[in-house]
Image (cartoon, grey):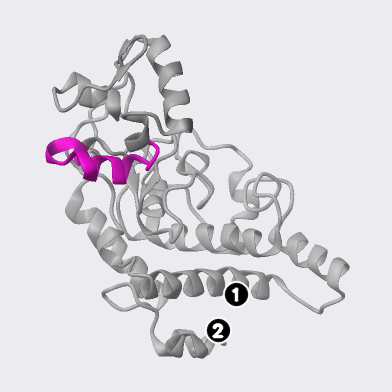
Amino acid sequence: MAMEWEEKGIKDIPTDHGILKFGNGEAVLDMVRMIAHREKDGDILAEGSLRAAQQIGGDALHFAMQVKGLELVCFEPRSQTNLALGYATAPIGPRYDICEHDWDYDTDAGWPHTMEKSRTLGILNRIPMDYLGEEKVKNFKALSTIWSAADVLDLCIFAIAPTRVISLHDMATYLHFVTGWETSAYEIMRLGERRLHLMRAFNQREGITSEVDTLPDRFFKEPLTCSGPLEGITLDKARFDDMIRLYYQMMGWDQEGIPSRAVLVDHQLEWVESS
């Protein structure tokens, strides 16, 4: 972000080895130290991209690649719309482990074994990585729910369903072996949903509302620069917003992304309303 500020004439950030800019590796090493010790402009960047850009003002925020104050990971949402939906709506911001990545389900590039354990989640067909529409929302809900359940149970996402060795049924079996509980794959998915509802309600209480369920404007306005079949694509903002609204409805949340009382009661979370 700071390098783009320099490139676009927004702000120069000096270091012991010159201005922080693309190609100046020594300045990058200087800045790591300056951020750690909050020295000079390192004190600004130490706040993270959102707060730093807000301090600078003007066009600086345009170059802050963040959602809910958390910087984006390196996986491109313009080419993987399942991830795009996850980056925008996840209560914790744009982590790479919100849900299984679109590449696994792509009609051309997807792994051959992907579909073997996906049927139990209601995912029956492959979808192009960059597809924007209702079917992708349905799949995202299932994929984000099972990875949410993995977080609840402290199961590694690199081992679990739907694209790795441990099936949804296995997850329930392991929980039974460890706790002695009579459980099921149904309960595993319920745990994942309950966590998402609870985190959503917490965010609402803390003022993190549906207004920040979006992506940086650059993904909607700047074409993807790469060589290959996805070169030049952007995310369609109107269709993407429609997907977010549909996801809210599927989760039982209102237009502002707030869990309904019915959902809270269904998941034994009615106490949340008074907290």
Which residue appears at 22% of the width and 28% of the height? 232
Q: Is residue 220 left or right of residue 200?
A: left
Magenta stretch mostly in which secondary structure? helix
Q: Residue at x 40, y 79 (%)?
A: 259
- Is 127 left or right of 241, judged from the image as shown? right
Please, what is the three-letter code of the amino acid marked with disc 1?
Arg
Residue 75 position, x and y percent, is 43, 36
Q: Nearer the viewer, residue 139 or 10?
A: 10
User: Which region of the structure is painted magenta?
Assistant: 46-62
Q: Is residue 12 left or right of residue 173?
A: left
Amino acid type assigned to the residue bearing label 2 in the image: His
Q: Residues within 10 Å of mark 1 (few under 14, many from 20)?
A: some
Q: Nearer the viewer, residue 181 or 41?
A: 41
What percent of the width, then of the height, locates residue 91? 43, 61
Residue at 36% in and 48% down: 84
Label tally: 2
For discs 2 and 1, the disc positioned in front in the rendered view? 2
Is residue 123 in sight in this rendering?
no
Q: Nearer the viewer, residue 208 or 28?
A: 28
Quadrant where the N terminus lies?
top left
- Residue 56 painted magenta: yes
Q: Are marks 2 and 1 in contact (CB under 8 Å)?
A: yes
Q: Circle 2 — which element?
A: loop
Task: Count residues near mark 2 (Cα–Cα under 10 Å), then give few for <14, some for 14-19, many for 20+.
Answer: some
Query: What is the spatial separation of the Cα atoms under label 2 and label 1, in whole angstroms?
Result: 8 Å
Along the horizontal axis of the image, is 173 left or right of 121? right
Q: Is residue 41 above or below residue 270?
A: above
Q: Could you say whether the residue bearing mark 1 is in a helix, strand or loop?
A: helix
* Residue 5's disc number: none
The residue labelled by disc 2 is 267
Q: Which residue is mark 1?
A: 190
